[in-house]
Amino acid sequence: MNTRSAPNQISFDAAGIPHLLKQKNAWVNWRAVERDGRVTKVPCMPTGVGASTTNPDTWSSFDAAISASGFSGVGIVLIDDLVGIDLDKCLNEQGVLEPWAQQVVAKFPGSYIERSPSGRGLHILCLGAPKNTGKGGPENRLELYSKASPRYFTVTGSVYQFGTIVQCQDALDAVVDGFIPVRVRNEPARSLQDAASLQVELDDYAIIEMACRLNKGFAKLWSGEDVYGDNSSNDMALCNHLCFWLERDPVRIDAAFRLSGLMRAKWDEPRGQQTYGELTIDKARQRVVNTYRPGGAVGPRVRGESGSKGGRQGMPLVVPLDFSKPVSAPETLIQRFVPRDGVGMLWGEPGSYKSFLAIDWALRVVTGTHWNSCKVSKGSVWYLAGEGHSGIRTRADAWLKHNRRLPSEVADRFLLTSSAVVFNEFDGGRSEEVEQLAELIQSGKGPQMIVVDTVARSMSGDENTAKDTGGFIRAVDYLIDLARSQGDPLCVLLVHHSKKTGEEYRGSSAFRGAMDFEYRMVKKGNAHCELSCTKMKDLEMPESVYFDRGIVGLGCQLDNHGDMLDISSLVLDVSSVGPKDADVSDSDERERQAAYVLVQEKVQTAWESGLPFTSQDEIERTLGGPIKRKPIRDAVASCIKNGWVHKITIDKTIYELVNKRKPNYFVKLTVEEHGMYLGGGRLPERVLAPPAGLAKPWSPVSEDAVQQAEADLRKKRERLAANERARVKLEAEAAAHLARDSGGS
């Protein structure tokens, strides 16, 4: 890790850090900043943007943290049951522990203990749930913290005592009882219990946590980062924020500020009849006019401002544009295609399969399944269906079967409304159904995505008037703002019909102005569909995507007349065809679809029988006959592109065990998007290591298969040995014969 000049005297050693800590995605970088003659360690993301101990989105992996350059060091946020104990200035110049520190260290014989960045202190990291946190010991040089007090711990890897991260509840209880008085719960402990002891209402801390997630500017100030270039401006800006979030109550504001990273001795310095802190709070209360209300505004509005969005980032209202920090990448729900926050439109003519795509996207979000080789953020989805409720169940069942997912994976996360949800009334106000959805979001049970299918069935009034369209959009924005206030981004996807011309969707131009992204779905002949992006606000415009349409059988069921019916549904797969190949004849499409289904069935059968294919040529030879080679070859390519099957290179060791003639690649069936079954066939588990992030156990391998593979290998080696012995014998006989001939001459 490349670092700038820092006050630490200890060199960072990644090798000394226990493996358990390295596995946690709770690492931050820190930068040494001097304030009022005191060095403050400001947490940052690897990009240089300030990090927050209350916002997991600002944390990173261990590898990312140590790879970043330009920082003073790294640290880990105290999450789960991780506990950190800081023994400050406990080592003298000879490296001898002071007696009080010896008592503490002796209580943790098996724990990992390292030297602090200064080289004069020690850090103890262990597991447990301390009954109190805060400072204690001689001159308050012992500090004990856990997840109850959101903070990070600097980590050096400079080992003082070799050990691991183990459970030390008894030792923690002894340290708390012996060194931390009950009254010491501050600086900046920031737990709910600590907040109560400092006259902070229990709900206030939850509000502050939400504000940190919602507003990056507030999170930076709360963590102690220098946002505006001087301490006084930072203090003023944080008080402006606290005025808004804590209803302009000076007592609550003062108590909260004392828990922030900006708190320092100057806060209590006298300024005439008042302290510096009291004057700062009074100025903030004079300037901030509105306050936080659930579902209302999401930032402080300051006197003299106009508009509903004024002052969201704190005071001052107008500030220079900051070019010192890198631009953060926009967050996405579906990588490169769908933003994580905002509202978008999926539109097309009737019969263009836009609802099938909406269901596809929704279920991929629910299961976290990749789409078009792009990662998908996993979360719950509300599908607000205005029509065809029974059909949605059939389509979802087909999707699950086609993508090899279980109904239990979506049961509690894919929620379907029992009837249409009307978003606006004729007067532009919100409907009762929307208010019910809002209550669920406010209770913390909101989704990551809402699909409204269709706009026409979910809107009252005239879609061609700006008034009624505006009421609909305001209701959608209302839900999105509520989700933001809870710290959870929300994407709303609207499914809508196109005009008769097919070149644009129906309704007022107010729709298009409000959209963050738009996609058009077009049916291409009788074979394919095309998805093209018509608007994208914050992401790059993606290229068009083409889809194959397949049929999935769901078995036979009796209808209401007692007749047996075959139940099936259409599914969409990202196709390998391009725009020139999208329009094909019905016969070509039937042949291509038959080949695709045949490849899937044969690969699955081969896998389950223990004899998977080892090359594409082998698949084509096996499946050739009634179907031409080219459709089979195209079907294999489509299966690989769609992620239904994969190919891997087989190394030499595995090739010997498999004993195949062509070891170029091994076609395997995908069971989980992030982890595949790699056992089975003639590949013993102990030879082929599972990939990182394997989601499920390996498929069982029979002992007979292992023994057969080993027997084949032994036979091969015996043949090679016999051939070698025969060769040596022949060479010896030839040499002897040659010697006799030479002697005879």
Image (tube, rainbow, N blue to C red):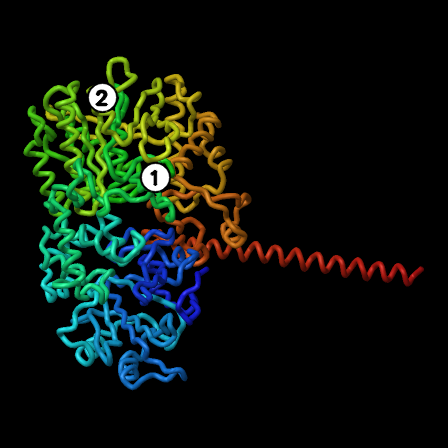
The quadrant holding residue 714 is bottom right
- Of the 4 image quadrants, the one containing the N terminus is bottom left
Q: Residue furthest bottom?
A: 99
Is residue 631 visible to the viewer in this orientation of the structure?
yes
Q: Which quadrant of the view contains residue 425? A: top left
How far across and down, in percent of the image, does residue 79 sit? 25, 61
Q: Evaluate whether residue 601 shows in this view.
A: no
Left/right placement of residue 363 relative to residue 308 reads right
Q: Quadrant of the C terminus?
A: bottom right
Residue 200 falls in image quadrant: bottom left
**Nearer the observer, 600 or 63:** 63
Q: Amino acid at mark 1?
A: Gln
Point out the residue furthest to the top here: 501
Query: Residue 595: x percent and y percent?
Result: 40, 28
Instruction: Please tell me which residue lies in front, 736 or 94.
Output: 94
Q: How many numbered circles does the render carry?
A: 2
Q: Which residue is mark 1?
A: 335
Label 1: how many Cα within 10 Å (few below 14, some 14–19, many 20+)? some
- Categorize mark 2 by other alpha carbons within 10 Å: few (<14), some (14-19), many (20+): some
Q: In this view, which residue lies farthest toward the right?
A: 745
Q: Is residue 318 left or right of residue 280?
A: right
Q: Which of disc 2 and disc 1 is earlier in sequence?
A: 1
Tell me which amino acid carries mark 2: Ser
- Residue at left 34%, top 35%? 539
Give the mark toward the camera: 1 or 2: 2
Q: Is residue 113 above or below residue 55?
A: below
Q: Distance of mark 1 from mark 2, alpha carbons?
A: 28 Å
Residue 509 is tagged as: 2
